Amino acid sequence: MYINRSMLMILGIALVFFPAAQGWIIQGPEAWYRPYLMWALVILLAYLNQRWWQGRQ
Amino acid sequence: MTLAGAPLWTLVLSYLIILFGVGLSIERRMVPDWIINHPLVYVLSLGVFSGVLGVYGASELAFNFGYSFFAYYVGVVVMFAFSPLLLAPLKRICTLYQLNSLADLLSFRFRHPWVGTAVTVALLFSLLPLLALQIQAVADSAQLLRGQTLTPTTLQQSPLAIMFCVGLLGFTLYFGTRLQQSNSRGDGLVGALAFEGLVKLAALLCVGAGALFVVFGGFGGLETWLAENPQIGQLLNVPPRQDSSRALLLTFFAGAVAMPHMFHLLFAGSPPRGALKAASWGVPLYLLLLSLPILPITWAALKLGSDAPVAYSALQVGLGTGSVPLSLIAFVSGLAAASGVIIVSTLALANMCLNHLVLPLQMLTRGHHLDAGHGMHAQLNWLRRLLICLIIMGGYLFYWALANRGSLVDLGMVAFIGTLQLLPGILATIYWPGANRKGLLMGLIGGYLIWFFALLLPLISPAETDFFRYLHLHWLGVDDSARSAATVFSLVVNTTLFLLVSLFTHTSAGEREAAEMCSTDDLNRPARRTLTLNTPEQFANSLAKELGADSARQEVLQALRELQLSELESRPYALRQLRSRLGANLSGMLGPNVAHQIIQRCIPFESDSPADSEDINLIERFLDTSRVPMGGLAADLDNLRRYHRDLLQDLPVGVFSLGHDGEVLMWNEFMERITDSSADGVVGSYLSALNPQWSEVLGHFVSSDRETTHSIAVENTAENIQFPGSRWISLHKANVDSSSRASEDRVIVVEDTTDNRILEQELLHSERLASIGRLAAGIAHEVGNPITAIACLAQNLEYEEDVNAVQETAAEILTQTDRVTRIVESLVNFSHVGSGSRGNAPTRMLPLNLADCVDEAVHLLELDLSAKPVQFSNLVDREQLVLGDSQKLLQVFVNLLGNARDASSEKGLVVIDSTSREQQVTCTVTDHGSGISEQDLKQVFEPFFTTKDPGQGTGLGLSLVYSIMEDLNGHIQLDSPLEDGYSGTCVTLNLSIAEYQEEYL
């Protein structure tokens, strides 16, 4: 059975470290915009990933 | 500031009318197709995930959980950003097998109707709080705008909630039951939802802008206010507990796919190509935009101060600032969010209830028959309408019964945690082939019992609220909210039961088969079995018993259209495809279990048909079109497969293979060219589907016991093909033995020997001319004698006066000329053997006298004066007729008798004899010459093999004799020494006339 290992590994790491990462991201009173920056980064990566897959196919 | 009831009623009504208009204009194609099919529409429609909980409830989440409210969005963002892990495989399965709901998917994977029923019931209970939440939000908003406080009394008297439900009921009934297949999303519905998504986003951004610029006076004002109120920052910066963070994340992660409305929009029907890829970043972007105004709105509401619940912060911005437009815009955002969720959830739940509760019950009460009479589609639509009414009514009654006992977040979280219980089943569907239904059902029962007692019951009965919190605190010793504890506990129990029961109980063969079909790299390998029905019409007639005549015919025609097949289709492969497509289409309409039962009953396979053979050609096609990336050993094997496939395809000889049932499994390019039949048309059919010439030749060879046959003539009648006209082919076949299958396939090699045949004929002609050359002296002598005699007689005739003497002389001249004519005729006859066009003229099988043929050969040989004198004894029965080509048989005897003469001693005896038995004539040519050595016997039929001295023979004689005997459907055998032990050679010719006489005559 084929499993996208690299993506699964990233997801696993994200789940394990989510609370820690969340604590770090929202640290500081003025860091309310930091989650949005991380979010935008995820969107960019998802966009690049699907472009890469399209190119490969 | 307060608003009167009438404008709000008007606003709700106007919004629903606009929504209806948008849906209708798309349905009637008043909007260009490129807009309807644009991935953006798909992305916006998926914004339905963010219902009231995302628009209003997000403020409450932020207020309660601080920055952890991002988990609501992050869960969905992760699901879409990592879509290749879960969404893409699920989409593939749902599209392929037409599964339109989670109940369909899980009952398909776990192969039992009870699974579908259990999932449907679980989702019904889980969704009631979500439906109530949407209704409550709209009703509460209206109450707040009218300046009323939210109490149970005002809630239960809210007529707006009823009107809202009735409006949505009308919309859902219209757009939800227009489609015959429940798996079709419907462009109108999707378009309307996309419109809602756009309205919701635009409205919330407007309110956010209002909060920022009207309440705070811009970014500077906001920063100043935050600096002046550090408690606000502290309120948001609540350090998240690890388990609650993960629980929130998992809850919304699961909700993105397990929520019926999301599943319906994601997978049902056929989303535009590339839409899911666009959604992988489009939905996160949409949610990012939607979340941007949440914090400013919440802060603005806190700054303005209000007694209303924090969930309605968006409304407070307008109400607090006295801005009617802002208030109405905020109301519209909630209205759009609520209506979207209710419409799609109701539709999805209605389909689930229909397929997994109503129809199975109906079949149970009717002896496992659907028996829809003449209007299955109409019957299903009426049932669907009834269910839609009941579900919306159920949602309203739940909202009415709750009477404001739960906040928006409470209701939403209960619903989301309910659907979270299905996550283990969804993951196992794709990633765990060992999972079974017992484990799934046990896990669901365990998880849902905890969910019911810990979350749903406290919502209905407030006295029980702290029961589980109490248990949790004492058992686990963790200080957390009851909700978070119940989430983790229910999921742990669910997963543990699922794992343990699946590991320690038997997984059925059906479940394993389904697991393989659901695995991410499955290629959909249907078994190649023989159907009992042979035409689409028979399919329709058989299905009519269950679906009704009209519906059955409609379904068959629809499936044929989708597969681009003709109504007259009879190829087994195509019919199996039709059966699969019908099963998938019915699954989309009736659910996989009911559809499976109907198809099994109405279009069965033959009971003795082996199920161990797979459609090899289908596997090949799927592998070619599959986009599953391969790595490691799989990639190496795939490369090897491609190499071997190309090798077979590009071979300069024709190769095709047949299954045990005679179905063509492979047809290479050479076969396509030589038969002028494309692989697409031949593969999956029987040889009888070929044009008559090829069908007869190949069919006859396949059914015969012979492993090889040479020089068969086939006439290609078609024009403008690579191999026009007559072709000569040699055929070879072998069994393909496989340890994995009980039955054997066969591979047939077709060799085009036309060029060899032409060369052979040219050599034959050369050999004949050489023979004539050798006979030249004898011919001259034989012709010279009568000519001399005629000359003498003519001279005598000049002086003859007696009439009787003249007549006698004339008769003598005629006798001599007859003699010359006979010699010339023999020569002409001999020289014309096989001299048709291109040397490949077909053999003309006619009755002929065997003894006369031998006589003529002897006569020709006697013309050769240089040859040693031998005695030919023709003992062939004078009455014996055989079927053959006289010219070709003449050449056979000339060659055989010539060889016998050369091998014999001077004045030796060559005997030609014949016997007949049943329909066969055996002719022997026996000499008592030097014979042939055992070593040479193996080679005598090979071209250019000769034991004679150089210049004495071409080595082609016996090779040509063999070839001619093949043409005459005869057989030749050489024995040396003779049976009685004497030296010499006996050539035996078998001429079979019985089998082909009637046919060729």
Image (cartoon, rainbow, N blue to C red):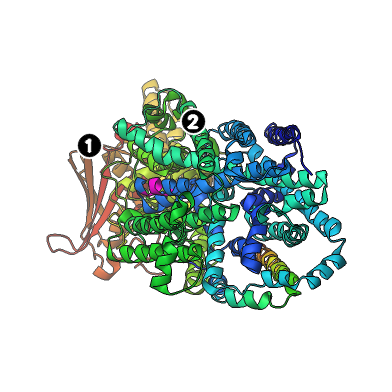
Q: Residue furthest top?
A: B803
Q: Nearer the viewer, residue B477 or B881?
A: B477
Q: Position of residue B177 (x, y in %)?
A: 55, 32
Image location (x, y in percent) of residue A27: 69, 77
In the depicted view, which residue is nearer to us: B819 or B792?
B819
Total numbered circles: 2
Position of B930 compared to B237: left or right?
left
| Residue under the image location 25 percent in, 61 percent down | B904
Q: Which image quarter is the N terminus of chain B in?
A: top right
Disc 1 crowd, CA 10 A, few/some/many (<14, 14-19, 20+):
few
Q: Which mark is on residue B964?
A: none
Which residue in the structure is indicated by mark 1?
B878
Nearest to viewer (mark 2 / mark 1): 2
Residue at image position (57%, 43%) is B152
Q: Is residue B607 visible?
A: yes
- Which residue is identified by label 2? B386
Residue B621 higher or lower than B582, as above or below: below
Q: Position of residue A42 (x, y in %)?
A: 68, 68
| Nearest the eye: B523 or B445 | B445
Range of magenta residues: B115-119
Q: Quadrant of residue B883?
A: top left
Point out the image quarter for the C terminus of chain B: top left
Query: Distance of mark 2 from mark 1, alpha carbons?
Result: 94 Å
Q: Amino acid at mark 1?
A: Arg
- Image marks 2 and 1: residues in contact by CB distance under 8 Å: no
